[in-house]
């Protein structure tokens, strides 16, 4: 589905941008730590403690940023819900329509985690669902 692909692409771009930002923050922290190690012998205990506090503060900021971007109910989670839920709703509506039209009690998602050893092709209604979504092969003739 083009809408799904577009949503996945947008989510991927956002995720990469957030990962890049987190990576830059981590590099900054590494630089601060390297500078502390290099200058440690020249620093007073008070100066060393101040630098360590600054590094700890930056580490906490990075953790918070990662949690905000990638954590449960973070920006990535919310963006996925915003962009992918409408596409999934269309799929569920199409599957529901096909199930009702064909008096089906169960419709399986073959792309999901469900494992079946054997399925009789006459019970495969994938083409009907694709047709209901407007994604069917125009050369196929499905009789309802």
Image (cartoon, rainbow, N blue to C red):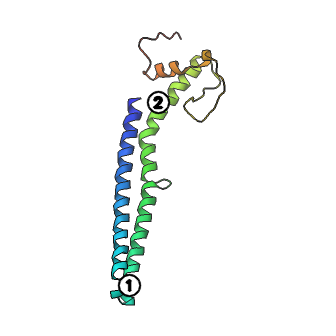
Q: Badge 2 is on which residue?
A: 90
Mark 2, other Cα within 10 Å: few <14 / some 14–19 / many ≥20? few
Above or below residue 22? Residue 144 is above
Residue 98, image x, y percentages:
55, 20
Residue 110, image x, y percentages:
57, 28
Residue shown at the point (38%, 30%) measured from the top left = 2
Q: Quadrant of residue 139?
A: top left
Determine which of the numbered discs, if any, sits on residue 48 in the image. 1
**Mark 2 vs mark 1: in front:** 1
Residue 144, image x, y percentages:
53, 11
Distance Cα–Cα, label 2 vs label 1: 59 Å
State the count of labels. Answer: 2
The foreground one among 12 and 96 is 12
Mark 2 or mark 1, which has the lower sequence index? 1
Mark 1, other Cα within 10 Å: few <14 / some 14–19 / many ≥20? some
Residue shown at the point (52%, 9%) measured from the top left = 143
Residue shown at the point (50%, 54%) measured from the top left = 72
Q: Tell me the element at label 1.
A: helix
Left or right, 142 with respect to 83, comes to right
Q: Tell me the element at label 2.
A: helix
């Amino acid at each position: 589905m083009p809408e799904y692909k577009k949503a996945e692409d947008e989510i991927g771009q956002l995720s990469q941008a957030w990962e890049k930002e987190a990576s830059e923050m981590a590099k900054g922290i590494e630089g601060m730590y390297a500078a502390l190690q290099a200058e440690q012998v020249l620093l007073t205990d008070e100066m060393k403690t101040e630098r360590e506090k600054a590094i700890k503060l930056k580490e906490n900021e990075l953790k918070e940023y990662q949690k905000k971007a990638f954590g449960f109910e973070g920006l990535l989670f919310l963006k996925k819900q915003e962009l992918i839920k409408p596409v999934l709703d269309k799929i569920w509506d199409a599957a529901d329509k096909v199930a009702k039209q064909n008096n089906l009690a169960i419709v399986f998602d073959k792309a999901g985690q469900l494992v079946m050893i054997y399925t009789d092709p006459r019970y495969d209604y994938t083409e009907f669902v694709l047709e209901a979504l407007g994604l069917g092969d125009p050369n196929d003739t499905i009789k309802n």
